[in-house]
Amino acid sequence: MSKDDASVHVLRKVVVDVFMLAGLTACIFITNFLWMPFQRGFFCGDETLMFPYREDTVTVLMLRVFGLGLPILAIVICEWAYLRKERDDQLCFGVRLPAWIRSAYCALVSFSLGVCFTELTANVAKNTIGRPRPHFFDLCKPSINCSAPEWQHRYIQSEDYHCTSNHPMLTKNMRMSFLSGHSAWAAFTMVYLALYLEKRMVWRGSRVLRHTLQFCAVMLSWFTALSRVSDYKHHWSDVLAGYFMGLAFAVIVWIWGTDLIEKKKNHAPLPQNDVALTIHPETLS
């Protein structure tokens, strides 16, 4: 491949990646702000909706900062440490691209696509199911009298009531319990980070440190998922579904969607051993 062909190939890849990420980001925006969730009703005696409202232990900002920051930092550091001595530099329109930068770019794009896939899938589930959160009664305070006999032991449709509370958190978000986006996001980002460290953190003496970092990453995701139950933001089944969805995406994106540059193997020359030829007299005619 000529230098011009290589440059065009790199440019084409970058354009396609940017286009895909921009399209997925637009879809996430639509599902977040323009798609109204399904208006699901409730039963008056449903105790799973009677929990009090609590603030987030793991806020959205914390989730984004740690979920994006830790994997990005690890990818940049590990690619530089692993490929910094590689002399497989490539020119793109006259600009030299070291091997570690190209490999880090591939990993970061795959990770970003996986994040978009995870969030988009969670948003579609939230809006389609429209399950009320455990603090639904506390936030909404439905207009009906649940003590009245006519509302007992029957499913109350969304058009039969309206919310009377003036709580500032009274938004469509209270109907988006299934599945847990926090759990899905945390599972994908931290499990992907653990899988990446297993592949790239391979220098001598790093095994104990690598396994410790992997354990810490997985525990961060596990703590985030458990906090969604203790904060009464999700039912346990929402958290379980979200966590396993993020876990599945992490494994799938890592195995089939991530391409990394490997070191070139330096083949040692074959040993030049003296070969002794023995000629037996009976073989001569």
Image (cartoon, grey):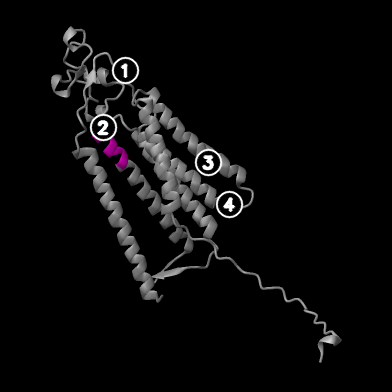
The residue that disc 4 covers is 202
- Could you tell me the amino acid type at mark 1? Pro
Point out which mark residue 179 bears. Answer: none
Q: Earlier in the sequence, mark 2 or mark 1?
A: 1
**Circle 4 sits in a helix, a strand or a loop, which is it?**
loop
Number of callouts: 4
Extreme residue toward the right, this view: 281
Specify the segment rendered in magenta.
Answer: 121-130
- Could you tell me the amino acid type at mark 4? Val
Point out which mark residue 52 bears. Answer: 1
Q: Position of residue 283 (x, y in %)?
A: 81, 86
Drawn side of residue 269 relative to residue 51, left or right: right
Foreground disc of the pair 2, 1: 2
From mark 3 to mark 1, how far is it between C-alphas? 35 Å
The residue that disc 3 covers is 214
- Residue at 19% x, 39% y is 34
Q: Earlier in the sequence, mark 4 or mark 2?
A: 2
Q: Position of residue 78 (x, y in %)?
A: 51, 52
- Circles 3, 2 touching at the beta carbon (< 8 Å): no
Q: Earlier in the sequence, mark 4 or mark 1?
A: 1
From mark 4 to mark 2, how far is it between C-alphas? 44 Å
Q: Is residue 126 magenta?
A: yes
The residue that disc 2 covers is 129
Query: How dense is the environment of label 3, judged by Cα within 10 Å: few (below 14), some, or many (20 and up)?
Result: many
Foreground disc of the pair 3, 2: 2
Query: How dense is the environment of label 4, judged by Cα within 10 Å: few (below 14), some, or many (20 and up)?
Result: few
- Circles 3, 4 touching at the beta carbon (< 8 Å): no
